Image: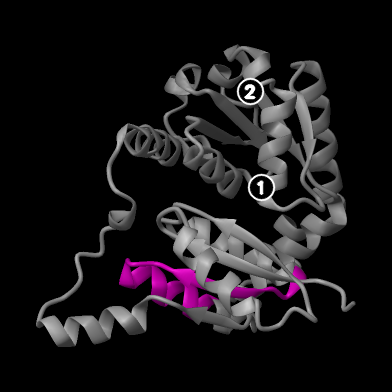
Amino acid sequence: MASPWEVFLLSDATGETAENMVQAALSQFREKPAILRRFSNVRSKNQIYEILDRALASQALVVFTLVNSELAQLAYEECDALGLACHDLLTPLLRRLAEQVGHSPQEMPGLLHGMDEEYFRRIDAVEFTVKHDDGQECRNLHKADIVLAGVSRSSKTPVSIYLAHRGWKVANVPIVAGIAPPPELLKVDPVKVAGLIIDPQRLHEMRTARLVNMGQNPRAEYADYERIEEEISAARRLFRKQRWTIIDVSTKAIEETANEILHKLKLN
């Protein structure tokens, strides 16, 4: 049997609709199995950039159902810039329906799945997580169920959002070389903190690709291999000193990283 390939599914709601549609289509291609990677509650530009960087590493097909027209357009343009094959499942249908009914769509994610207690719990978790992304609102770190720490481009944001969709309030804090971490982070109960580590070569490739895509110099210090090695070594020393759980994200999909975090923090 042929080796599996990957499909990245991006949704600003649960992603169940996209997954069901792709699964139905893939049933016609059983001779070439695919691995589906589902990313739910994708509602920011930063999330799209992070996820598509991961898709680039495996040259995955990107399929998205984003009711927000601006984010859908961004996903399409970013895939085009990265040379990734993509398919927008929702926008063409929304446009045709708008023509039929005579007004624009509401662009409200998740209407299909109702608004029960579980739904609102997850919404609260997502709102908390978005507000506490990338070191924002550090004064509220103690309110998080999970705190993620890691260097730039170590998947903090997509992992946080994935966990939030499962109902966990997550904050993430960047670890920057030469800059002391915020004191609020060091006061958080260590049992709630996971430090994300990534292979230096993998991180070098991701950062270089990001600089190229942004039209910046790929030889900048941000993507310098030796500097990256120093960053990761310093981060690992900090994680050990603080007795935080260490998670290596180098070869893991978002959901695999999330499940390992929940397991090692004894939350599942």
- Mark 2 Cα within 10 Å, few/some/many (few <14, many 20+)? few
User: Where in the figure is residue 68, as x and y percent of width and height?
Assistant: 32, 66
Left or right: residue 129 compared with residue 254: left
The residue under the point 40% across, 77% down is: 73
Residue 110: x and y in percent read: 33, 54
Q: How is the image coloured?
A: one colour
Residue 267 image label: 2
Quarter of the rendering occupied by the N terminus: bottom right
Q: How many marks?
A: 2
Residue under the point 81% across and 71% down: 4
**52 up-or-down from 149: above or below:** below
Q: Please tell me whether residue 25 is drawn above or below residue 116 in the rendered image.
A: below
- The magenta-colored residue range is 58-78
- Name the spot of residue 207 as percent of width and height, x first: 71, 61
Q: Which mark is residue 155?
A: none
For label 1, the SS is: helix
Residue 32: in magenta span: no
Dot 1 crowding, Cα within 10 Å, few <14, some 14–19, many 20+: some
| Residue 102 can be seen in this image | yes
Q: Secondary structure at mark 2?
A: loop
Q: Residue at x 26, y 58 (%)?
A: 108
Residue topped by disc 1: 255
Whichever of callouts 2 and 1 sits on the residue coming sooner in the sequence is 1
Residue 241: quarter of image: top right
